[in-house]
Amino acid sequence: MSTVQDIQFKEPAARAAEALRAVSSDELQDMQGEKMVLNMGPSHPSTHGVLRIILEMDGEIITKAIPDVGYLHRGDEKIAENMTYTQFIPYTDRLDYLAPLHNNVVYALAVEKLMGIDQQLPPRCQYIRVICCELSRISAHLLGLGAFAMDVGALTVFLHTFTEREKIYNLIEALTGARFTTSYTRIGGLSRDLPPGWVAQCRKFLDEVVVNFDESEKLLTRNRIFVDRTRDVGVLSKEDAIDFGVTGPNLRGSGVDYDLRKAHPYLVYKDLEFDVPIGSVGDCYDRYLVRMEEMRQSVRILRQCLDKLPGGADNQSGEPVNISDGKTVLPPKNKVMTSMEELIHQFMLVTQGVNAPAGEIYFGGENPKGELGFYINSKGGGTPHRLKIRAPSFVNLGVLPHLLPGHMMSDVVSILGSIDFVMGECDR
């Protein structure tokens, strides 16, 4: 494993924030002259959301690029300070809204680390959480690659990837009751166990989706147009990727062997066998190849989880999915109706939230876009004093002022598609 795992991302994240600061009038004044200034976005199809990039052009060549973010800002971090830890779970769905299950899991792990119960999670709960994370990874990459391919002219791939993504939504709906905004994870466990027949449906999906991977690769990997639009375009060196705090597939595409599931294992990742794909050049083509292989590795992880799932598919042995602490997890409804102690616990949990100790923690998980981190500062009680979200899309976009100059206008579409960002977590 690379020594990059020892790098602290505090300074690079600050550098990214500096790159994505509000555009000042002085900067726009500097752009005036014989060169052309163009606004790309905030309502441009290839920006995948409300991202505005101010481009200074010398003919067809970009000489300067200033990303302008904040159009979608909702104040999630401030909202968290005015509600209980459990009440904030639905808000994590709206960060990377292509992988809401993964956001739920990472946030719950952060709160559980603060409370000191992260090592008490039942094995079945941990395996189901990993299943949720890897399904989210496949879903997010399918959409990212489909949209990327469509942006550079390959519409058929988009139809292929969305067909498989619909199957994932069917699995998620059966599991959580919702297709998009899941809110499935709870502090100390899960809202419910796997429904009957779900494991068999998931196995069927895994057998089908690998066929889709092969089809998508046949359409793209050796496609002359796709290769010309992506190879040696948007090259991000290993050193620059580290300097800017880039994480996830974009970092690994630059040749850095860093994956939080391997570097700092959480849940049951240390018991699972999978490889971390890395690139060699760091261009758009490498980032595409890394994501394709990551999806295959996620299928490999999911199959291991389904085989090792404690209690089996139908949980006939009654393996728990929540910790056995009535002051952290809502008690069973039948006991609430018949026991005064459980009734009091439910009332306290719903009205005041879990009683977290004073202190501060940071937890980061390997989200499909990169390292999704939650910093929580607590003064005790059921509400965080401060909550900070390290959004991988925000940090990854900070590399654009460095990456875009020197490229042609048409290359911006390829570079943005290969970075694969979501403005929901960028602006928060």
Image (spheres, rainbow, N blue to C red):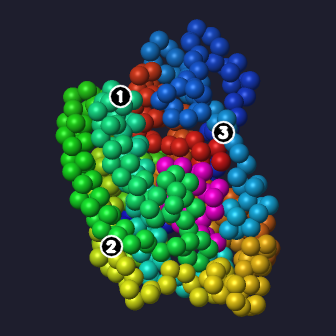
For the N terminus, which image quadrant?
bottom left
Q: Residue at x 66, y 76 (%)?
A: 114
Give the crowd class for mark 2: few <14, some 14-19, many >=20 residues within 10 Å: some
Dot 2 or dot 1: first in sequence order is 1
Give the crowd class for mark 3: few <14, some 14-19, many >=20 residues within 10 Å: some
**Dominant secondary-structure state across the stretch colored magenta:** helix
Q: Are the residues at dot 3 and dot 1 in contact (C-beta closer than 8 Å)?
A: no
**Left or right for 392, reference 131:** right
Which label is found at residue 152? 1
Vertical side of 391 occupied by 151: above or below: above
Q: Residue at x 36, y 43 (%)?
A: 162
**Left or right for 214, reference 144:** left
**Residue 303 screen position, x and y as percent:** 29, 69
Vertical side of 33 occupied by 237: above or below: below
Rounded to the nearest angstrom, the CA distance separating label 2 from label 1 is: 37 Å
Q: Nearer the viewer, residue 178 or 277?
A: 178
Q: Amino acid at mark 2?
A: Leu
Number of marks present in the image shown:
3
Q: Amino acid at mark 1?
A: Val
**Residue 302 screen position, x and y as percent:** 33, 67
Give the magenta-colored segment's residue range. 89-111
Point out the residue furthest to the top here. 34
Vertical side of 105 occupied by 296: above or below: above
Q: Amino acid at mark 3?
A: Leu
Q: Are the residues at dot 2 and dot 3 in contact (C-beta closer than 8 Å)?
A: no
Rounded to the nearest angstrom, the CA distance separating label 2 from label 3 is: 38 Å
Which label is found at residue 306? 2
Rounded to the nearest angstrom, the CA distance separating label 3 from label 1 is: 26 Å
